[in-house]
Structure formats: C-alpha cells, structure tokens
Amino acid sequence: MEYLVAVLIVVVVLLLSIGLHEVGHMVPAKRFGVRVSHYMVGFGPTLWSRTRGETEYGLKAIPLGGYVRLVGMYPPDAAVGNPPARSWLGRLARDARQASAEEIRPGEDARAFYHLSTPKKLVVMLGGPVMNLLIAVFLMAIVLVGIGLPTLTTTLSSVSQCVIPVGADELRECTPSDQAAPAAAAGIEPGDTVVSYDGTEVTSWDQLSGLIRGTGEQEVPIVVERDGELVDLTITPVVADRAVYDENDELVVDSAGDPVTKPVGFLGITPAQEMVRQSPLSVPGVVADTTWQTIKVVATLPARVTDLVESQVNGTPRDVNSIIGVVGIGRFAGEIASTDGVEWQLKAASLLQMLAALNVALFVFNLIPLPPLDGGHVAAALWEGARRQVARLRGLPRPGPFDSAKLVPLAYSVFVLLGAVGLLLIYADIVNPVQI
C-alpha cells in the first residue's frame, strides 16, 4: 500500500509541476497582451477540457509534458521578407509561419507573440523553468526546515565489545582473538551522550570523530551524560586500521578496488541519528548545489545515453548513476516508502528531496538552447535582441523580427530524439532498472 501511495504522490506532483510550468509561461504572456488559445497538461488525446474566456484548458492522455499555445509564435511571411521555399526545410518553415498567422484573429495582430520585445519574450519563455525552480525551493524548504535532515549526534546508539578488523563482517559476533574495544572497557553504555573528550567540549559527531581519530594509545578523560547526570570516565583508545573516506563521504579504494585504510584512534562507539531541522538560510545553498550537480549531469547526457544503450545491448547491470525516466522515479519512490525499519520522517524527506531534484532537472533541462525546449526560444529571442542592438549602435534601420520558423526542422528533430530517449528510458527502467 505504501508503495502505491508513493507512486501516486509522484504522479500528482509531476502533473502539478508540469501544470505550474505552463502557468509560468501563460500568466506573463497574458499580462503582456498575448492571446493564449490553449493550456494543456499532457499530450495526445484530450481527456477533459473547458474553455474559459479566450483559452481552452485541458488534460490529455499522456502525462509526459504540457504546452500553452501562444498565438503568433512565428512572424508571418511578410514580416520576414517573404523568403522563398526552395527546399523541404524552407517549406516546413513557410508552413509553420502560415499556420501561426492563421491563428491571429482579424484586428489582433498586435497581440501576436512575435511582436513582443526581447525582454518580454525572455520573461515568458523563462517563466516555465523558473516556476520549476521555485517548486524545488518550496519542496526543499519543507524538507530542511519542516522535517529536517538525518544527522549523526553525540548520543551513542551502540557500543562495540571488540575491534572488528577492516574487511570483516561488521555484524559478526566477537571472538576471543578480537581485541577488546576501549569504549566498553571504560564503562561507556548505549544511550550515553558524550559531553567532552580530552578536555574539549563536544558539540557534534564530526568534531568528536576527528578528536578520537587524532589520538593515540594514551589515557584520555571523557565525560558523558547518563540519565541526566554527568559521568567522568577515563578511556584509552586503540590505534586500528580504519577505512578512508573522501570529502563526499565515499569510500576510497586503491587500483585493485580494495578499501584504503590508515591507522587512527578507535573507541568502538556508534552515534545515534536524528532528524535535525535546518535554518531557512540553508535552502538556497542546497538548491544551488543540486542545480550545479544537475548541470554536470546534463552536460554529459550524450555519454550517459550511450552508456544506457550499451547496457541494454550487452545485458549488463546499469550504473547507480545512470539516468532514469518517469518509471524509474516512480519505482524509487515506491521503494523508499515501503522500506521497513525507517522512520516516516526520513521516508518523507527522501521522497520530497527526490521530487525537488526532479523539478531542478526540469529547470536545467528546459534551458538547453535547442527548440522546442524553452532554451531554444530564449536563444532565438536573444539573437533577435542582439541584432537590434547592433543595428542601433551602428545607426542602421531596426531589423524585423527573427524568422524563428527556420528552427522548426531542428525542433522536429530534437522532439523525435527526446521521444526516442524517453521510450528507451521507460524500457530500461522496466527490464533493467537501476538498483538502489
């Protein structure tokens, strides 16, 4: 049941994200006087629609996108000098201009999108991606400020009885040949909260861990809080080989794939974890970092698609960092929600973080400067504005609108390519899913 509920939540949030993305385009377009004839969530056959004012609002059968139809997206033939259509590419552009012109009602040419100034076009085109970014900020704020992040504390969840060698099963029972763990020998118990170590006040697990790892085999005073009282103890750490982790908390391995170890101070204590609410000021930084990580993924998208194709052809397991589609996202959500032994707060935070990351991905992906993505229209508007600024600086007549219909063949090609990648992702997420 939890699995199904999580999948339904993802579907609803995805539809809301798509719908609000299109609202981000529609509202400024209407504010600038452009007639918006259609507002649709989804593609394919129309399941439901209603006309309010001059706009038809509807829901279509395939919930993998949406669109708003802005009247007069392309300038008519006369506005761009009636270019001849000598090739099939030219005919595609001409047909797009004529179809766009047919949508303009008599006497409403001034309401066509192509008449907008460059800044207004940018506001309309960027409104959708920015809406996704705002959704991501909202969801991340719920996670960080409302729920909190899982944080290791100075309260101990368990105390080891022995020192388990690196590479051995950490869950196995202690044997007579194992060295006794210092914490248990010193009388430290699960539930104790470490207050100070070697005379230094302890405020976080990272600080305590660093203090322990930096000590050798000498007696160290340690103060713990137990049942509301302070208990003074003396502990002698052992120096044991422990695995090395990098700044991203990932295990460092050598050329043979074995964990890299180093001798450090060791007590044999494990911290408890609790959800700690963060400051609202942390939200922009987390969203900015997520955006940057997403940009790096998008920049390597061709290579990642190639790897995906190879994994399907060769039948090899997919990398944990492989790109996923809507089916994979739904599966992740279901697995997160149905995991046993995990507090609901952590499940909710993980699900909301995933949905926030999805909206960041929509924000970044839509800014790729290729039509029919929003970034393609942004690039066209910037080119048109640049031409006009150059003409103004050189004292030349103001150029007419950029013939953006010339980009229609490219838009069709990109649309087909994205559709193929989308189908590939659906197939891969079903027959060869990423394992988490």
Image (cartoon, helix red, strand yellow):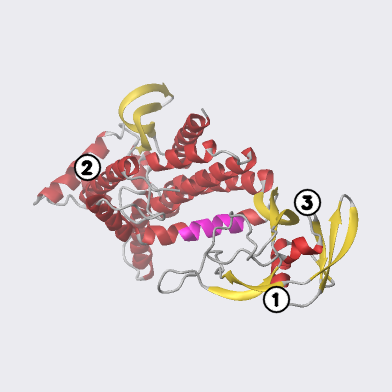
Q: Compared to 37, does 307 lie above or below?
A: below
Q: Mark 2 points at which residue?
A: 96
- In what element is the residue under mark 2? helix
Residue 289 magenta-highlighted: yes
Q: Which of the numbered marks, if any, corresponds to residue 214?
A: 1
Residue 81 magenta-highlighted: no
Label 2, label 3: how far apart the Cα atoms are:
71 Å
- From which residue to which does the magenta span run? 284-293
- In what element is the residue under mark 3? loop
Is 257 left, or right, of 46 in this rendering?
right
Q: Compared to 406, does 111 lie above or below?
A: above
Q: Which of the numbered marks, if any, corresponds to residue 191?
A: 3
Q: Compared to 155, does 27 lie above or below?
A: above
For the residues bearing labels 1 and 2, Cβ distance under 8 angstroms: no
Q: Which of marks 1 and 3 is nearer the N terminus?
A: 3
Is 435 left, or right, of 154 in this rendering?
left
Residue under the point 30% across and 50% down: 371
